[in-house]
Image: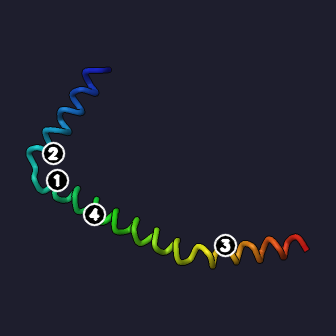
């Protein structure tokens, strides 16, 4: 089983070494993912207190 894993990893590395566009695409996807993560974090920072208040109101309503 170990040689199969070793062959898979070597084939994967060879693919990334030979195809420059694949690496560029990977970097673009990484940057896009980082941008989406930043947007989600900023949205949570601004919307966090509002959502927290909504849950507190629901919790208070359920207790009474």
* Eye-nearest disc, 4 or 1: 4
In the picture, the quarter occupied by the N terminus is top left
> In which image quadrant can residue 50 be found?
bottom right
Q: Is residue 23 left or right of residue 37?
A: left
Q: Position of residue 64 (x, y in %)?
A: 91, 74
Residue at the spot of label 2: 16
Residue at the spot of label 3: 52
Secondary structure at numbered mark 1: helix
Dot 3 alpha-carbon crowd within 10 angstroms: few under 14, some 14 to 19, many 20 or more = few
Contact flag, marks 2 and 1 (Cβ < 8 Å): yes
Residue at the spot of label 4: 31
In terms of sequence position, does the residue under pointer 2 or pointer 1 come before the other?
2
Alpha carbon distance from label 4 to label 1 = 12 Å
> In which image quadrant can residue 14 be found?
top left
Contact flag, marks 3 and 4 (Cβ < 8 Å): no
Question: Where is 17 relative to 55, above or below?
Answer: above
Secondary structure at numbered mark 3: helix
């Amino acid at each position: 089983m170990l040689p199969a894993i070793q062959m898979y990893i070597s084939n994967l590395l060879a693919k990334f070494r030979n195809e420059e566009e694949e690496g560029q695409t990977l970097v673009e996807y990484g940057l896009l993912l980082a941008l989406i993560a930043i947007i989600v974090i900023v949205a949570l920072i601004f919307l966090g207190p509002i959502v927290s208040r909504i849950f507190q109101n629901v919790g208070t309503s359920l207790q009474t």
